[in-house]
Amino acid sequence: MGSLRSVRYVAARIVEIVLLLPAAIAPLILVAMGTTQSQAGAPDIAAQLDTVRVLSQTYEVWGQASSSFFFCLGALLLNYLLYRSRLVPRWIAGWALIAVVPYLAGACLVMFGVLNPSSAVHTILFSPLALNEMVLAGWLLTKGFRAPSSTLTTQVAATDTSSRAGGGFA
């Protein structure tokens, strides 16, 4: 079951990256098309520029918030796995599981136009998870992962053996 959650975590991160791509690519397309327009002067370029502008404005409204949703989904899965495996202290993973809620609320409030992304309330809602990620990074840099306990290793081995005996996949 843990490997399925790991796959879900990776899938959530891939979707998040795909949703963030327009933010990185749209300005580059605008610059490229702007230089092409000045060189060619074709009327088709103006229509294409308008299309790219509309796409980038749509991203401003929905893209960041929807990628934030998949970021929260990935954070939930990762920290659930960290909490269950006890590879890091449970208080760090538990803190993240709780801190995802205001982060997701802030993303939804921005998506529906209740909050401005540059508002102080938005920053306050995002801060607990941001601080948690810094604490987790500091912990991993200084202490690293804990060695799996012998009881956890025994449970994983027993689960793996029983799934092989039944012919199923883990």
Image (cartoon, rainbow, N blue to C red):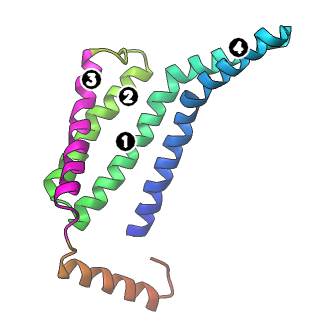
Quadrant in the rendering for residue 131: top left
Q: Are marks 2 and 4 in contact (CB under 8 Å)?
A: no
Q: Residue at (24%, 64%) from the top-left corner? A: 84
Depth order, front residue of 166/154 = 154
Q: Is residue 19 left or right of residue 89?
A: right
> N-terminal of the two: label 2 or label 4?
4
| Amino acid at circle 4 | Gly
Query: What residue would you read off at disc 2?
Result: 107
Residue 106 at x, y percent in the picture: 32, 26
> N-terminal of the two: label 2 or label 1?
1
State how far apart marks 3 and 2 are (Cα): 11 Å
| Amino acid at circle 1 | Cys
Residue 155 at x, y percent in the picture: 26, 81
- Count of number-bearing discs: 4
Query: What residue would you read off at disc 1?
Result: 72
- Does residue 75 show up? yes
Q: Residue at (67%, 24%) from the top-left corner? A: 29
Query: What residue would you read off at disc 3?
Result: 123
- Magenta segment's dominant SS is helix
Q: Residue at (17%, 56%) from the top-left corner? A: 142
Q: Is residue 133 magenta?
A: yes
